[in-house]
Image (cartoon, rainbow, N blue to C red):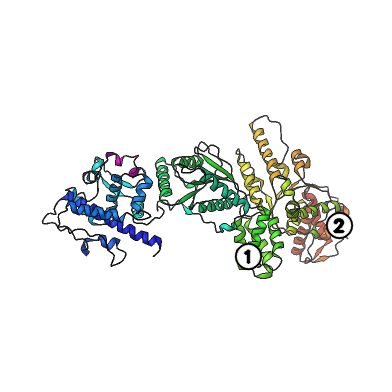
Amino acid sequence: MNDLARWQEQNNHYLASTLAWLHLRLRRLAGPEPANSALLAVDKPEGGRSLRRLFAQRPDESLPMLPTPSDTVTEQDLNQAAAEMTTAESIDPPPALLMLAQRFGLSRFEREVLLLCAAMELDTRTARLCARAQDDPARPYPTFALALAFLDDPSWDALAPERPLRYWQMLEINQPAGQALISSALRADERVVNYLKGLNYLDDRLSPLLAPLEVSVEQESLPASQMGVVEGITRQLNSLGDMQRLPVVQLLGADGLSKQLVAQVAAQSMGLRLYRMPAELLPSQAGEMETLARLWQRESVLLPVALYLDASSIEQIAPEGPGVLVNRFLARSSGLFFLDTREMWASLSVPSLVFDIQRPTPQEQQATWQAALDSSVGEDVSQVSARLASQFNLNLPTIFDIAQRARAETPGEALHGRLWEVCLLSTRPRLDTLAQRIDPKATWEDLVLPEAEERLLNQIAAQVDQRSTVYDLWGFRHKMNRGLGISALFAGESGTGKTMAAEVIANSLRLNLYRIDLSAVVSKYIGETEKNLRRLFDAAEDGGAILFFDEADALFGKRSEVKDSHDRYANIEINYLLQRMEAYRGLAILATNMKGSLDTAFMRRLRFIVNFPFPGAEQRKAIWQRAFPAETPQEDLDYERLARLNLTGGSIHNIAVNAAFLAAQAGTPVSMPVVLAAARAEFRKLDKPVNESEFRWG
């Protein structure tokens, strides 16, 4: 028999002894049984659940016996029952009733009142005894008047709202209108009754709001940077001693899983089980809030638990809103709370400890990849881990989850490619609402640019690929806290290849490419644009995406002189963009055909500026030669003649597509007359002068 089973057996024995003593006291108050009454014997089956049936763990277990109902209760009977109760309570740990009384400061009278109410649930004969003791068959339940009449050391204030029995909601009072409190029915709370019986589970009224927080990562896997935070939390909390109210632990940062992992390990190190509750579930009604706060505070005493309050979606404590509810809940309850916020809440009404939680460093992520992959990769594990850690910025649970999923789906040699694909997929969902994903298909062979500009594009791709070497192995990360990302400006007329160049880079690096949807980002409401931009950049920080700001001058325009509130808030948005771009650690590409409209502060923060010139004749010829796929049937196309048409690459692409449709409709290959007809239509669309001699053939 283990220690818990032994204690439960001893606790049951103590409960049986206390109920035997309690029933004797009730019977002495009630007096002899009337002759026409048939109070049932202890072990008589029709008497419902007897003490022996309820508390005996084994058939041969010795339990205290009640005198038969026909016996007169003597002082000797009471003394013997009290002695047996005293003997039964001398166990370690103490019985649940005594632990409850000690933890919540119950007096002896309050403890016995609670026992009287719990007896209604533990022994069905209690109701009949209560009715007899009160000389009223209509009152088969405990009342405060009954407790005052037969228990020692009665205290009138035991049911006062500020005393433990009512404050901690251990008792429920059924007081109909017009009935005195002293004669109203008392009922023990179900959670408390279960605790007295040795069943210590979370109150089921809290179950719809709370969920156990169990991030599936071993404590030993926690990286040194995050383990240092855990040690800081536990050290500061332990240094406070036995304070009645612990400070709230504010966990700051954008990565929720890392914060949950740190909180879970910190709670485990203090012997606590962690539960999570979204702040949005806090009730707005004052009465419901007070009930929730007291129930949780009671649970923090009955169970070794802590609460992770997720307020990451709440900006700050505004005059109205969920932030006020969080503040009210923390002020009305106590225990250990972890508050998940993005930024510090300085206006909390309770003391707090503040810790900034970051994702593991690139070196720690590489070590985690190696531990997660072990030797299951078909190539050098260290190389695969280094490449994944250099490109993706992921937390520990995500790394282990990706490694497990990739191993389960792909065996051996193909695992590296599958790992990369799963990493890309894991960074996509949070971006899809703010940006449009572009499936990059263009390659370096499709791109036609002057040599200098193409060389710059190659440098951009190389810097993204070699970030880990320069920043981590060569020590630049220790010297820089900003500018670790790569930002580039693609400037040139519409159709000169800016979007295609972004596709080429994304395709060569095997990364997701997202064109920012300005209509979803820019908002007329004050502060909303900054929130959207922050969500956008935070999502892209995972490393699996390239941000492509098309028509960037609309978002990154010059700051203007402040003449009214609209100018001031517009400048605030641009200032935020300036700061966020400098702190961003991924690749961001800005495209514009109005380079002069950009704010000069952006120009300083750009690492690359690539000018896309209007293509010359030789470049236009190369573009025409690559405009039609190899599968397209062609007939005697004169690329020299087509190159004389003064068009950008985008317009040439449009002509090629339109010519293909014209040829398909006519059932002929793509020929010069068809291409020239499509070119004439393109010129008219662009409002360019049309010289018919340029579009004749033959």
Side of 660 where 268 appears, left or right = left
Which stretch did the figure color magenta?
149-166
Q: In the picture provided, is 186 more to the left or to the right than 216?
A: left
Answer with the quarter of the image where residue 388 lies. bottom right
Q: Is residue 103 above or below residue 65?
A: above
Earlier sequence position, callout 2 versus callout 1: 1
Q: Is residue 151 magenta?
A: yes
Please report the residue visible at 66 percent of the width from the left and 46 percent of the height from the top: 518
Reading the image, the residue beneath label 2 is: 621
| Residue 675 position within the rendered picture, expressed as x and y whole percent measured from the top left | 81, 59
Q: Nearer the viewer, residue 156 or 94?
A: 94
Residue type at the position of mark 2: Lys
Pick the residue in front: 4 or 278. Answer: 4
Q: Position of residue 307 (x, y in %)?
A: 48, 49
Q: Nearer the viewer, residue 272 or 662?
A: 272
Residue 514, how many percent across, how many down?
68, 52
Q: Is residue 599 visible?
A: no
Quarter assignment of residue 149: top left
